[in-house]
Image (tube, rainbow, N blue to C red):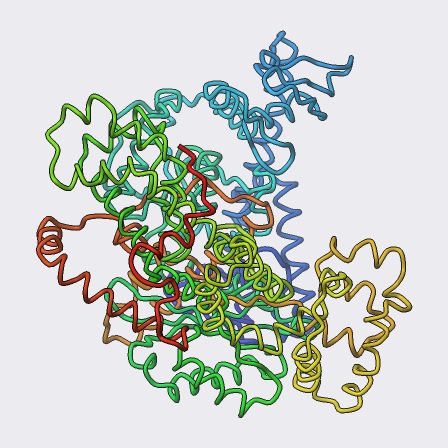
């Protein structure tokens, strides 16, 4: 089909597509209906099935595909052999010209770089990298670092990558001074990009920037090479000279930079200040500076050089957003391919956004990774088990019941009811409570025990006093704690409280020295200050803190297994064992004295019973070779019952169920492949699911069930709710297109964060220490900070009445765990004696 009227030439590609705009930049394929951006050249690549810049057409005839490929090859070869191609009038479309000009520009630039480097070497140029290393052989292929002593193979270029901390090829040098790092990194940029040619001023005036919308049509984001060599990234030419025959309109920026045009004139401080100004102007969360995507963006902009024009906001919200969605869905296809072996888990990640609305994000987890599926505003659903069941059932239907092993939600009564309804309808999957949420509830109720709450309240008074007097906080950091904070946020609120209590214990000596210093003694102390001084000086207080920390430490270890940036995840194969170890640890700490460990056990049993007796948990414990072949393996009847139930529910074929049950003795007695030297040696070394895939080949039916059980998490926590996108995009909007755009943004945002978290975990990179974000502290540690003076005054006035009310609430809560409804520790001061006897005075 011909192009729109007014076209100067008829390209053969127009026989197979229709232009959708006046500029002929968007063309619709006549065969598959795809709309290709970038003009007729991109359509011909689409028809010729040339991958790399555009998806190819599966429905075009073979003869059309072959013809388009020949046209493109002929165009390229004629351009390569004829420098006067444009002058002779034999031209393809304008887009072809631009592509070929860029290709020739890059090739000529490469030749010029090689020539310039050869001239440098012949003139006696000494690479600056030799100032910081010593050659270890005659060929100078091995260089020893003068700072860390590491011997780097590969020559001076590889050694400079070591100093410049460029990831992907060599381990970075952490001992090199900052000025050396900056200097070598700048040298590496010059080396890779080539020294900028000196352009006369009269020619420089004719230089214009690219149009980013045209330039980025063919670019693809290579996310798998995130930590690879940046030298593989395509560098576009920075500028293009305007020809007299085809003048192009330059895109002008709103802000003109008035400084020097030379790169050397821009200092590191100026660049850092500019980034800071952008963060604070737009309101970007400061944690974004730790994002791997932000770091790569800055690196690539530096490699690109001058002349880069930022894409428009319309491009970000339209085509670039859709490109990211396509990339993410490509990863999803990779995940789906593994579900036939391992299955997947549906996670209901629940949080409250800035507007106070309850949000549920539905994630799909498997060993390959976690991806975000969708989200709902669950403010009303959270109180209706039937509505929640309908959402979960629809999600299972969308993913495929045959792929789903379990659905994980919070351990609330509404979620439990919805889970039971789901299990009744879907006979081949389980509902499971989130182990992280259940453990957080354990810590919450432990914090309500009488002596624990007393200990926490006194500790909170210490932090309130310090963090609400600037001079005292500065004095503590500068002279006593070496800049370290007392507040320590963790994954959950009550875990943060006990982590902060541990920090106070670690700084016990520093806090005592603070309140004995001349600066404090000579200051005007308030009544609250004098009380805090007495608390810090009290030996009995620190004994109680030590006792409480020792008691909750086993539970805190379970919490740390379940969350954190780049940390381990609490997986099904180990959950039952960790929980049993936590209970036994608490019992051992209290010397098997039931009066001491009894309250902790009752709290744990109340919240963990649903986990201890869950078929998936006990079956994962049974199939984990690291536990099964140990002498202390607990072969309870509930373990055997859980294994049988899992085989029946997860294996729909009755014949394979029977075969799997008959193969269990081979596993328990380590016969055949289970008893080989390699299988025995890797019981604790390999991942349990990988161990079964490697050594369960003689029991395929049992292997299938075991792998589907051992491959999953038991936590519904996705990304940490530090700066969730839903606080930005979940507002009310009337337009259908606006709602779709926001859903797309949420989809891309959440999946990119999940992918970044997985990449950090693969690299074992936990990132920099978590900074004390005040919004985060207000959410996780509100009781450890004073929010306003009015609340503090009201709290002091109502202290007597509040103590009575709190005591009644505590007694009511304890009735849930104590059948006798009596205080376990007796009355009055005798309570302290129960646990003070075994604690030594460490003053």
Q: Nearer the viewer, residue 669 or 253?
A: 669
Q: Residue furthest top?
A: 124
From the top left corner, tell me how far across and down residue 101 is, in percent. 53, 42
Residue 317 appears in the rendering = yes
Residue 341 as seen in the image, left or right of residue 295: right
Q: Is residue 625 above or below residue 615?
A: above
Q: Nearer the viewer, residue 492 or 534?
A: 534
From the top left corner, tell me how far across and down residue 811 is, in percent. 30, 70
Q: Nearer the viewer, residue 472 or 62?
A: 472
Residue 324 as seen in the image, left or right of residue 761: left
Number of disc labels: 0
Q: Is residue 571 above or below residue 639?
A: above
Q: Quadrant of residue 772?
A: top left
Q: Is residue 181 above or below residue 217?
A: above
Residue at 48% over, 42% down: 767
Residue 717 appears in the rendering = no
Q: Nearer the viewer, residue 609 or 73?
A: 609
Q: Quadrant of the C terminus?
A: top left
Q: Quadrant of residue 309?
A: top left
Q: Quadrant of residue 616?
A: bottom right
From the top left corner, tell me how far across and down residue 463 is, in percent. 26, 42
From the top left corner, tell me how far across and down residue 676 is, in percent. 90, 60
Residue at 43% over, 61% down: 750
Q: Is residue 326 above or below residue 585?
A: below
């Amino acid at each position: 089909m011909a192009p729109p009227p007014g076209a100067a030439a008829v390209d053969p590609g127009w026989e197979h597509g229709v232009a959708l705009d006046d500029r002929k930049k968007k063309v619709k394929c006549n065969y598959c209906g795809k709309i290709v951006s970038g003009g007729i050249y991109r359509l011909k690549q689409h028809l010729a099935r040339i991958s790399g810049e555009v998806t190819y057409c599966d429905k075009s005839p073979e003869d059309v595909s072959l013809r388009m490929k020949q046209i493109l090859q002929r165009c390229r070869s004629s351009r390569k052999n004829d420098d006067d191609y444009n002058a002779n009038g034999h031209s393809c479309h304008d887009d072809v010209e631009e592509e070929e000009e860029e290709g020739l520009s890059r090739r000529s630039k490469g030749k010029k770089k090689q020539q310039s480097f050869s001239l440098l070497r012949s003139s006696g140029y000494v690479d600056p990298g030799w100032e910081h290393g010593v050659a270890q052989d005659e060929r100078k292929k091995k260089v020893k670092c003068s700072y860390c002593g590491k011997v780097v193979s590969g020559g001076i270029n590889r050694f400079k990558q070591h100093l410049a901390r460029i990831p992907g090829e060599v381990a970075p040098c952490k001992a090199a001074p900052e000025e050396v790092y900056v200097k070598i990194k700048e040298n590496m940029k010059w080396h890779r990009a080539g020294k900028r040619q000196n352009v006369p001023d009269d020619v420089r005036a004719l230089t214009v920037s690219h149009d980013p919308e045209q330039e980025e049509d063919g670019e693809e984001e290579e996310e798998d090479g995130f930590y690879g060599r940046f030298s593989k990234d395509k560098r576009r030419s920075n500028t293009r000279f305007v020809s007299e025959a085809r003048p192009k309109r330059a895109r002008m920026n709103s802000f003109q930079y008035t400084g020097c045009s030379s790169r050397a004139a821009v200092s590191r401080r100026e660049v850092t200040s500019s980034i800071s100004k952008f963060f604070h102007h737009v309101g970007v969360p400061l944690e974004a500076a730790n994002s791997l995507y932000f770091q790569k963006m800055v690196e690539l902009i530096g490699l690109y050089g001058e002349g880069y024009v930022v894409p428009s906001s319309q491009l970000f919200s339209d085509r670039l957003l859709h490109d990211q969605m396509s990339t993410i869905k490509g990863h999803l296809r990779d995940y789906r391919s593994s579900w036939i072996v391992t299955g997947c888990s549906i996670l209901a990640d629940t949080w409250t956004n800035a507007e106070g609305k309850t949000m549920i994000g539905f994630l799909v987890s498997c060993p390959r990774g976690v991806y975000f599926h969708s989200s709902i505003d669950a403010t009303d659903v959270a109180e209706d088990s039937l509505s929640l069941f309908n959402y979960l059932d629809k999600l299972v239907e969308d993913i495929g019941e045959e792929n789903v092993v379990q659905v994980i939600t919070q351990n609330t009564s509404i979620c439990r009811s919805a889970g039971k309804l789901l299990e009744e309808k879907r006979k081949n999957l389980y509902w499971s409570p989130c182990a992280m949420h259940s453990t957080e509830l354990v810590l919450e109720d432990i914090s309500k025990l009488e002596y624990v709450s007393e200990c926490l309240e006194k500790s909170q008074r210490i932090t309130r006093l310090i963090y609400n007097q600037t001079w005292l906080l500065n004095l503590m950091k500068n002279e006593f704690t070496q800049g370290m904070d007392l507040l320590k946020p963790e994954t959950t609120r009550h875990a943060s409280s006990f982590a902060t209590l541990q920090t106070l214990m670690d700084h016990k000596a520093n806090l005592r020295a603070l309140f004995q210093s001349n600066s404090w003694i000579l200051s005007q102390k308030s009544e609250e200050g004098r009380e805090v001084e007495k608390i810090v000086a009290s030996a009995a207080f620190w004994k109680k803190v030590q006792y409480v920390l020792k008691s909750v430490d086993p539970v805190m270890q379970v919490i740390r297994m379940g969350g954190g940036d780049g940390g381990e995840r609490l997986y099904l194969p180990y959950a039952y064992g960790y929980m049993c170890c936590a209970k036994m640890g608490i019992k051992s700490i209290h010397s098997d004295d039931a009066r001491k460990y009894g309250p902790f056990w009752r709290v744990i049993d109340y919240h963990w019973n649903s986990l201890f007796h869950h078929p998936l948990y006990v079956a994962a414990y049974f199939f984990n070779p690291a536990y099964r072949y140990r002498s202390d393996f607990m072969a309870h009847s509930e373990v055997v019952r859980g294994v049988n139930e899992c085989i029946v529910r997860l294996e729909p074929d009755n014949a394979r169920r029977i075969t799997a049950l008959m193969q269990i003795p081979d596993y328990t007695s380590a016969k055949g492949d289970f008893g080989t030297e390699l299988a025995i040696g890797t019981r604790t070394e390999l991942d349990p699911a990988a161990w079964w895939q490697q050594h369960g080949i003689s029991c395929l039916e049992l292997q299938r069930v075991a792998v589907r059980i051992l491959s999953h998490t038991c936590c519904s926590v996705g990304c940490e709710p530090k700066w969730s996108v839903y606080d930005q995009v979940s507002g009310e909007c009337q337009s259908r297109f606006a709602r779709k755009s926001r859903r797309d943004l949420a989809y891309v945002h959440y999946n990119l964060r999940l992918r970044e978290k997985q990449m950090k975990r693969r690299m074992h990179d936990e990132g920099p220490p978590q900074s004390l974000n005040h919004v985060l502290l207000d959410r996780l540690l509100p009781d450890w900070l004073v929010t306003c003076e009015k609340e503090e005054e009201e709290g002091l006035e109502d202290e007597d009445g509040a103590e009575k009310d709190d005591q009644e609430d505590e007694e009511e809560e304890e009735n849930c765990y104590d059948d006798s409804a009596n205080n376990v520790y007796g009355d009055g001061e005798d309570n302290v004696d129960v646990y003070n006897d075994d604690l030594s005075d460490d003053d």
